[in-house]
Amino acid sequence: MADPVLSTPLENGTAQASADADSEQQTGLLQARLVTVEHFFGGFPRLFRSVSDPRQPALITYPLPMVLATGVLMFVLRLGARRQVQHWLRGNAPSVAKFEALFDVANCPHGDTLNYAYARLAVDEVQEVVTGMVETLIRQKVLYRYRLFDQYFLVVIDGTGVLTYPERHCPECLTRTQHGQTTYYHPVLEAKLVTACGWAFSLMTEFIENPGAHPTKQDCELKAFYRLAARLKARFPRLPICLLLDGLYAGGPTFALCTPYGWKYRVTLQEGDLPSVQEEFRDRAALMPDHQVHLPPSGPVKLQQDFRWVNDIAYVDSQYREHTVAVLECLETTQAPKAEPHTTRFKWITNFAITAQTAPTLANQGGRLRWKMENEGFKVQKNGGYALEHPYSTHPIASKVFYLLLQIAHLIFQLLEAHHLFRTAFPAGVGSARNLAHRLLEAWRNLRLSLLALRALFTQQRQIRFDTS
């Protein structure tokens, strides 16, 4: 029989050093996540303290902040379905210990427990938690450096589909019939605060739904926009806002709404939109050579930009209301190595007075950031592991609560990726947001510390600095 292979002291030392390094990284990562919530929002119990608990006190096993925080954790860890809470978070000793350290309950609620509790909550109270988190970041001046012209917070409003069913899911379903087949679906309209560094934080949500099973007219994105705008103004009456909107909103109702609200706007202007405005822009722009700016090629793809604009364009809408608007056009030419030049035309309508100094900023730090909603917002939430389009619940109230908790998780995750505690734990990065979620899951399930050490780790006061370069 061959002699057994024994590890040498050197090999044992190397393995121990590697294990220690893994443990140190996991500790740093967990601390970065929990300290983010503690530093900005006072921890999960304080974050959810305004949400009323309708359950019978004698039958409660898990406090409501714990039930809501578990839903947030499900999205942060990209578990993809509430049943995965049972498989990944319950029955795992290190995971249970972390729940106990945070909430003094030595277990984790089942995914069905989440659904049961969420179905009884007030959606507007959970919405206020989401809105309040962004308000906290504004008040703490975390977002001040990203204001347009050091004044306006950029808010993108756009809609997306969330749930789709082949049969009626609830009386509020919207319906769409194509080729003789009816689809039942639930879209939402989102107001997201966006920044040039890539953040896209949900500020407020308007659920687009019918008032009953057989409405005379269906709800739609435009109707939802007016409701959302009124709620946004009531909640932030003095916040300097610049709306970034797509071509659906290019018209008198939007302009008439923004004027009394004191909001600025930039709306994408397609070639077929507002013919009278387009014609006046073409005629006057050709006669105004001083309203043009050329930015020479720069960057690795040799990006060249040519701007032209016209102010004080008169527009009368279908209700005979008079508006004064400006139009900004940008011709963007890219010259990648070994490729033919490619030019793209962008055009926006706005209530800003445009100058040679402000035109590039309005285009590059304003109008172009509407894409952040789709790229850093909906696209990440649908395809980046959050599984936005997964039916986390068939209950109409619980499904909305799950949606709002996803927005909270996405906000926390964006902050986590950008601050220095994470970058210190992983100076070389982790490759992708999915990898970071996987590392978090590993740390949550594998890192073993005493209850005292965990509580000290989660409540330690740390300064947080952001690197959003």
Image (cartoon, rainbow, N blue to C red):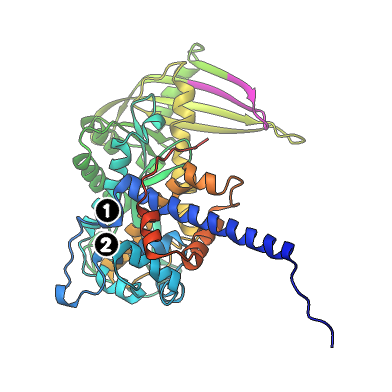
- Residue 153 is situated, as x and y percent measured from the top left of the image, at 34, 33
Image quadrant where residue 67 sits: bottom left
* Magenta-colored segment: predominant secondary structure: strand
Q: Is label 1 in contact with label 2 (beta carbons under 8 Å)?
A: yes
Write down the region rendered in magenta. 295-308
Q: Could you say which is closer to the camera, residue 137 or residue 403?
A: 137
Residue 436 lies within the magenta run: no
Q: Residue at x 59, y 56 (%)?
A: 21
Q: Could you say which is closer to the camera, residue 114 or residue 403?
A: 114
Q: Residue at x 40, y 54 (%)?
A: 457
Q: Relative to 438, say whether 468 is above or below.
A: above
Q: Could you say which is closer to the camera, residue 431 or residue 452?
A: 452
Q: Relative to 237, say whether 323 is above or below.
A: above
- Residue 76 is situated, as x and y percent measured from the top left of the image, at 43, 59
Element under disc 1: helix
Q: Which residue matches tag 2?
A: 65
